[in-house]
Image: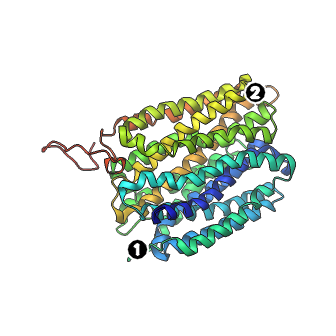
Amino acid sequence: MTRPQFTALIVASALFMEQVDATVIATALPAIAVDLAVDPIALKLAFTAYLLGLAIFIPASGWAADRFGARAVFSSAIVVFTIGSICSGFSSTLEQFVAARVLQGIGGAMMTPVGRLVVIRSAPRSELVALMAWLTVPSLLGPMMGPPLGGFIVTFFDWRWIFWINVPVGIVGFILARLFVPDFRAEDPGRFDALGFVLLGTGLSGLVFGLSVFGQAFVPFWVSLALLAAGAVCTTLYVGHARRSTSRPLLDLALFKYRTLFTGVVGGFLFRIGIGAIPFLLPLMLQIGLGLTAFETGMLTFAGAGGALLMKFTAAPIVRRVGFKPVLVVNGVLSAGFIAVTGLFIYGVPHYVIVVVLLTAGFFRSLQFTCLNALTYADVPDDQTSRATSLSSVSQQLALSTGVAVAAFILEVLRSQSGDHSIALTDYLTAFLILGAISLVPVLTYLRLPADAGASMSGRRRRAPPADSDTSEGGA
């Protein structure tokens, strides 16, 4: 094993902790709702609270790594995430649970993007696709273990243990990070964009939280509208601030001039809306809609992570053989189709069919993620990778939280139209069909890519452009 591969595996140990946490809570939602005496749909706040912490603090992760060193920031993030996990386990009200999840999100905000930055800077561009696969193999074990582990804990023990199991993983990750993670930092990180941090943090949190509580009794309706309006205004103000800034902005929107980054971030955002809803929507459908236990749900839903794990050994050869564009187009259509097909589970299909569908869907979905993540950095200069990492990470987390909010909003609208204000089985099918359609939209952005997009990473030979052509990255 090479040094970059070993570094990727250390980073992946932290991602493993995050992924176990995310998938365990998805399976445990109905049980947590009963214990906290809240509506299961209201527990979407548990998802979005975590993503809220991510959205606010991820923009500062790149600057913090450049200023204080990747090793210090990464190891400190593991500590914060672990403390947040402990607090989640001790929560007794929805408000306490939401606050603890925000704390976890703050830790995750520094952990994931800084860890990805360490991996990107540890190896040549030509090895990045394969290295991304190394990075995600252990983290994919989290989603495989999470659902059955969460179902087992909820069914036979107490749901609080799903958070406390993060403690030993966090301790091991912290020790390995302090000993082996390279301490990358910039010679001149520049001044921290405090105004940008306030505008962007307020804007993103307003949008995420406002969308999450929209239509819920958790806050008055006018408060939801005010949060959304404030979020939109502050985000707009940040865009103007970033364009006028003569120093380094918190999120550098000028990076969108690189076509591959634009496609990876914008196309990935739309694709992840559908994907982000699955951990919230699927367990609700299986447990509340079809009456399965948490353990049965976990034993079925882990199949998606199994398919994703299988894909990681084939991603690099596939991309090397056909290139990024064909993979993104064809695989994007297949992945969106599998999201829609998931809604057909309401018709009582055999469990082995559910496993096969989720296994196959996980394979194609993970291939899409790997390609999008690698393509995003294909044309970004080395001295701008930390800014690109922050931009990409914010987009990803915002998309996932939007997916949860959209799925919950669809169910709320459909439930409000029923006579007894209950969720019908067909409502889940409608939600999955809408989410599948949303995830299909970014295929249009993939079609606009040049045939040799991302050739420096795919390993395919880049074709020489005609002598009179415009080869600038920002070209149409």
Q: Which amino acid does label 2 sit on?
A: Ala
Quarter where residue 255 is shown: bottom left
In front of the other: 165 or 180: 180
Mark 2 vs 1, N-terminal side: 1
Q: Can residue 372 be seen in this view?
A: yes
In front of the other: 202 or 288: 288
| Percent coordinates x, y for residue 245 in the rendering | 37, 65
Residue bearing the label numbered 1:
186
Residue name at image x 80 percent, y 43 percent: 30
Residue bearing the label numbered 2:
424
Packing grade of label 2 (10 A; few <14, some 14-19, many >=20) is: some
Q: Which amino acid does label 1 sit on?
A: Ala
In front of the other: 438 or 160: 160
Q: Is mark 1 on a helix, strand or loop?
A: loop
Residue 471 in the figure: left or right of residue 270: left
Rounded to the nearest whole Å, what is the CA distance between mark 2 and mark 1? Answer: 55 Å
